[in-house]
């Protein structure tokens, strides 16, 4: 079995606190507002792959927690990110999820025109305005980085370092997948689940449930699956193909069909691998494809899930078939996880709920919760403060901690 890929200490300490977040953290609107500002907007988010915006003027939009972003390839082939917000009246300067602005970005409200580098080209009926500074009235930029072909943005400066620094422990292994060779498959998809966003993470951050809840994965992996805990904002999970697997139709045919890329090393040729990125994103790797998925809160009880899968541009017929079979396994697993997240989320609202009691195999849940507590100390309270006092109580606790 492939072991940890860096010198990070991923060992589980003895006598650790096995209790997770208290139930009130899953239903407090005031806490959710703090999460939006300090957890989501201050941390890196995956938007797309460079292959989603291959040509000059190609763009992808990204909405999260009340903010909206525009990621576009400019005339010099540089990828830029801006608020999707006209400097005139605040309209979206592009209304579609993706598309192409051939020579300029034209606001659909009043026709203000911006260059692809975000600078203002001109206002409609300019004689009705004072002279406008092209830079000052340009689109507001957003911090943007590209890592192995994937585009990340961060709305506000936060505790995470650059994406390159954050994901440095994965760099050697990730490079073996040659992600710059990827191409889109079915585009970026979204769905809504009636739960708190943390319930998605609580299920996804541990593999203890795989043997019982995911028969296809258990058939594919057997006992080889293991999770590393979150360390400095990233986690890793790994599983090898089960030599005796194949009782289920999709797994049996997948194992027969799976054909890794010629450049892929032996240790990755029969493995599924996952990288978790705090607070809400995951990369998934198979020999045939790379995917990402993430979730964002719409309310305390509604979560938007967003994902995309990418293939290798030169995939063979067999690899395409294997990718299809892998997607069947993944789709079945996702449906099972949705039900688990609903049940888990329901429990937090029960008067009988006394919190989680976690196995060593669920230490990834614990470390994710520890990352949250480090950002918002109010998570450490067993009972919820008054909603109107949530921000004040958290600020006081943060001040006392400092």
Image (spheres, rainbow, N blue to C red):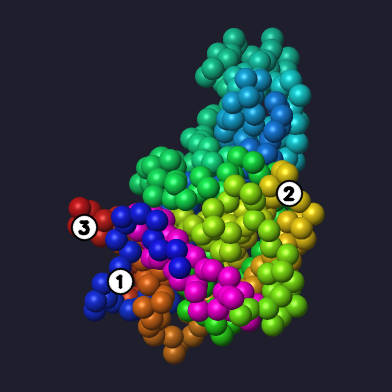
Q: Residue at x 50, y 36 (%)?
A: 145
Q: Which mark is residue 315?
A: 2
Label 2 secondary element: loop
Q: Which residues are magenta?
A: 215-243
Q: Which mark is residue 12?
A: 1
From the viewer's perspective, is residue 77 above or below residue 63? above
Observer-nearest of 39 and 266: 266
Q: Residue at x 35, y 54 (%)?
A: 6
Q: Residue at x 54, y 17 (%)?
A: 135
Instruction: For residue 268, say whether it is visible.
Output: yes
- Going from N to C along the chain, the mark reached first, 1 or 3, is 1
Q: Which mark is residue 401?
A: 3
Label 3 secondary element: helix
Dot 3 alpha-carbon crowd within 10 angstroms: few under 14, some 14 to 19, many 20 or more? few
Label 1 secondary element: loop
- Going from N to C along the chain, the mark reached first, 2 or 3, is 2
From the viewer's perspective, is residue 226 above or below residue 346? above
From the viewer's perspective, is residue 35 above or below residue 251? above
Alpha carbon distance from label 1 to label 3 = 25 Å
């Amino acid at each position: 079995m492939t072991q940890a890929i860096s010198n990070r200490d991923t060992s589980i300490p003895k006598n650790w606190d096995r209790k997770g977040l208290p139930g009130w953290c899953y239903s407090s609107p005031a806490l959710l507002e703090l999460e939006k500002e300090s957890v989501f907007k201050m941390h890196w988010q995956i938007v797309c792959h460079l292959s989603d915006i291959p040509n000059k003027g190609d763009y992808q939009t990204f909405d999260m927690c009340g903010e909206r972003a525009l990621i576009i390839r400019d005339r010099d082939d540089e990828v830029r990110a801006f608020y999707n917000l006209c400097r005139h009246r605040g309209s979206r300067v592009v209304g579609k999820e993706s598309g192409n602005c051939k020579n300029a970005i034209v606001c659909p409200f009043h026709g203000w025109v911006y260059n692809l580098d975000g600078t203002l080209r001109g206002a409609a009926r300019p004689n009705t305005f004072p002279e406008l500074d092209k830079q000052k009235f340009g689109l507001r930029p957003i911090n943007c980085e590209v890592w192995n072909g994937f585009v990340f943005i961060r709305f506000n400066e936060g505790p995470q370092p650059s994406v390159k620094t954050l994901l440095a422990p994965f760099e050697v292994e990730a490079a073996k997948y040659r992600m710059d060779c990827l191409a889109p498959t079915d585009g970026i998809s979204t769905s809504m689940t009636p739960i708190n966003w943390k319930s998605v993470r609580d299920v996804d951050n541990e593999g203890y449930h795989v043997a019982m809840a995911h028969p296809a994965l258990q058939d594919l992996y057997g006992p080889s699956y293991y999770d590393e805990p979150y360390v400095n904002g990233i986690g890793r999970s790994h599983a090898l193909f089960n030599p005796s697997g194949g009782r289920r139709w999709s797994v049996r045919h997948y194992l027969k069909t799976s054909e890794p890329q010629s450049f892929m090393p032996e240790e990755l040729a029969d493995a599924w691998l996952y990288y978790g990125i705090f607070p809400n994103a995951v990369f998934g790797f198979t020999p045939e494809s790379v995917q990402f998925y993430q979730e964002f809160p719409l309310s305390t009880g509604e979560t938007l899930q967003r994902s995309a899968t990418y293939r290798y541009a030169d995939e063979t017929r067999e690899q395409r078939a294997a990718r299809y079979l892998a997607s069947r396994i993944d789709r079945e697993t996702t449906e099972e996880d949705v039900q688990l997240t609903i049940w888990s989320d329901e429990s937090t609202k029960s008067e009988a709920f006394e919190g989680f009691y976690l196995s060593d195999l669920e230490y990834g849940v614990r470390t994710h919760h520890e990352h949250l507590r480090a950002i918002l100390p109010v998570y450490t309270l067993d009972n919820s403060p008054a909603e109107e006092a949530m921000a004040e109580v958290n600020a006081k606790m943060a001040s006392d901690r400092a």
